[in-house]
Amino acid sequence: MTAPRIAKTPLRCVDDYCSFYTNLFSEVRSVEAFKYLHLGTLSPLKRKSLPKIADLVGRENPQGLQHFINNSPRDVTELRKRRIERRLRAIRGRKIFLIVDETGDPKKGRETDYTARQYLGKLGKIDQGIVAVTTYGVLEGITFPILFEVDKPKKSLKPGDTYQTKTQIAARMVREIVSLGFEVEMVLADSLYGESETTFIEELERLQLNFIVAIRSNHGVWMPKGSRVRANKWRKFDRIMSAGKVKERYIREIVFGRKRPRRYWEITTDPETLPANSTSYVMSQVPDLKYHQVGNFYGCRTWVEYGLRQSKYELGWADFRLTNSKDIEKWWEIVCSAYLLVSLQNSCLQSDPVPSSHCPKTTEDKLLTFFESHPQWNETDGWKNWLNNLRLLLQPLASFNAIVNWLKIFPIPQLSQGFSRLIAILNFFVGAVSDVEEPFDFHFSSA
């Protein structure tokens, strides 16, 4: 009886991460395609198309990757379940800030499911495209995607679809996130959700979640007859930006009648002129909330822009050439999974604090010295720095696959063997995602 073929290992740190998912697949080809798609999304390819990814990983035909997207597994639910399980394990019960937002990307034509003329945040205007409602978490300065769902405009519904507004989708997603086991310290959202009293805000209250959301400047509040609106004095506070810089801001509370658990705020850079592009109106429901906390807590909402930017411009969120919404969601799930792989390199998200190389102490320093001596290796914390290091590990594999056809025409054994040896050495780098310690045997010679 022939033994089953073992899935190829393109890059050890990616392979170890993907092993958390591989028993979902019945075929070795699906396991390999899953790993190759992770390598492709992590790579510096400008456009993460399936043909480009196939070239990068040394696959002559991209049809295997296309087949995986279309057929294996048929539903994205199991992939998402595994990713969420891995994320919860890394968080270890700590509370997160939950940010709700939507993101849109232009898509020409009418073949792609649920495309329509609608507002696209990427363009800042109405155009033909596809929109997704997204939820991102923030923990200790690390942003990560949790759930997403395609928005289905009324005019592009299919038979059997039920129309839901973005705020209804968001309310359901928040409810699901709580049921999955995430501990939510606070929910942040823009005015689309802040103005949705009967669907989104009431759902947050039912779930007993604290929230700070944007509202419109003309937001109305029901008050008892004879009550009045008053604005407290402006107070100066230090707005702490994501890079640690401090900027001066001003805040005042707007009180409608008497004070209630739900409070209203105005935040600006200039209390005299109230510039439209730097003045915000905010509604909060957080016990014992202090003036200086409002602006800094609400400011965390901008972290979703950081997360979406990395998903789009680094991992290829909108690079799909797919028309079926289920396939598109599968592509997005691969992007979210690759995002998790990168963010797990942060020590605060490692489920079991161990040395990043998973090597015995006697060889750890030597191994890290070799990797970190690369002039482009970045030891500084930060999502893009960790992505940079993973891309450095991927370089020899991609470079070899770029010239392998020339080596078939002009065989140079020393070159092929040198690449193979370098790739094998780099596969000793496990990263921070493996839970298995293995014997370490590393020999390096300049000869």
Image (cartoon, rainbow, N blue to C red):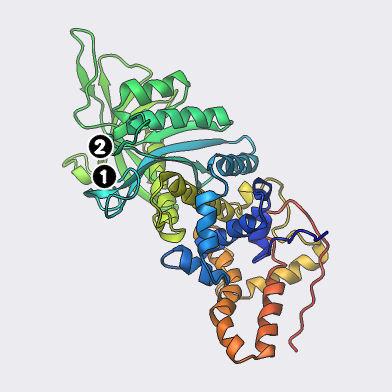
Residue 42 appears anywhere in the view: no
- SS class, disc 1: strand
Residue 291 in percent (x, y) is at 37, 32
Q: How many discs mark residues in the rendered view?
A: 2
Sequence-wise, the earlier of marks 2 and 1 is 1
Quote the CA–CA distance across marks 2 and 1: 8 Å
Amino acid on which the number 1 mark rests in the picture? Ala
The tag on residue 155 is 2
Residue visible at 75% across and 89% down in the picture: 447
The tag on residue 116 is 1
Q: Nearer the viewer, residue 224 or 426?
A: 426
- SS class, disc 2: helix
Q: Which residue lies furthest to the left in this view?
A: 273
Amino acid on which the number 2 mark rests in the picture? Lys
Side of 182 where 106 appears, left or right: left
- Dot 2, how many residues are within 10 Å of its Cα: few (below 14), some (14-19), or many (20+)? few
Residue 214 in percent (x, y) is at 31, 34
Quarter of the view holding residue 378:
bottom right
Residue 417 in percent (x, y) is at 70, 84
Circles 2 and 1: CB atoms closer than 8 Å: yes
Q: Nearer the viewer, residue 332 or 63?
A: 63
Q: Is residue 264 above or below residue 433?
A: above
Q: Residue furthest top?
A: 225
Q: Is residue 108 above or below residue 82?
A: below
Residue visible at 30% across and 30% down in the picture: 265
Quarter of the view holding residue 407:
bottom right
Residue visible at 73% across and 70% down in the picture: 367
Residue 107 appears anywhere in the view: yes
Side of 249 where 383 appears, left or right: right
Side of 366 where 347 appears, left or right: left
